[in-house]
Amino acid sequence: MLYYIKKYPFSLAITLTVTYLSFFRPPSINTPWFDGADKVVHFCMYAGLSGMLWIEFLLNHRKGGLNVKRAIAGAVVCPVLFGGLIELGQAGLTRYRGGSLLDFLANTAGVFIASLIAWYILRPFILKRN
């Protein structure tokens, strides 16, 4: 566990923040900024989580070789599963939150867009700076 705390401190901090924000009781707001504003928030939270996982993974493994399967498992599959578990937890563990398929899809879209950016833009840049 200490290994992951040392190698992925920002990813762990973002994971804890997303977990907290997903389960705390939000203040009542009469009207959203615009329809779907919460979906943008979901997209950004999970894009940030996946993006940071990619950055820390690439920085930690640029010299020892890049294990693509491990990277995809950690920076794509895990955040998508985490988003699904959060939505199930909101539906089953709280009375003031509800699980939503659209929220899960926004989470997943954030993960995939961040992953595409990381793979095609960040990866070449980080690996070049070896």
Image: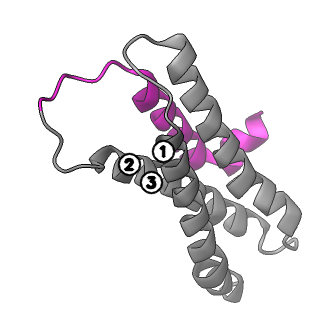
Do callouts 1 and 3 mark residues in contact (Cβ within 8 Å)?
Answer: no
In screen coordinates, is 45 left or right of 15?
left
10 Å neighbourhood of mark 3: few (<14), some, or many (≥20)? many
Q: Is residue 52 visible?
A: no
Q: Which of marks 3 and 2 is in front?
A: 2
Q: Name the residue under label 3.
A: 43
Q: Nearer the viewer, mark 1 or mark 3?
A: 1
| Residue 91 sits above or below residue 53 on the image | above
Q: Which comes before the other along the chain, label 1 or label 3?
A: 3
The type of residue carrying mark 2 is Lys
Do callouts 2 and 1 mark residues in contact (Cβ within 8 Å)?
Answer: yes
Mark on residue 72?
Answer: none
Q: Quadrant of the C terminus?
A: bottom right
Q: Mark 2 points at which residue?
A: 39
Residue at 73% from the left image edge and 42% from the top image edge: 4
Spot occupied by residue 76 in the image (x, y as percentages of width and height): 70, 56
Out of 60 and 97, give the one closest to the viewer: 97
Do callouts 3 and 2 mark residues in contact (Cβ within 8 Å)?
Answer: yes
Spot occupied by residue 5 in the image (x, y as percentages of width and height): 67, 40
Q: Name the residue under label 1.
A: 102
Q: What element carries label 2?
A: helix
The type of residue carrying mark 3 is Phe
Residue at 15% from the left image edge and 29% from the top image edge: 29
> Which stretch did the figure color magenta?
1-30
CA distance for labels 2 and 1: 8 Å
| Residue 97 sits above or below residue 33 on the image | above
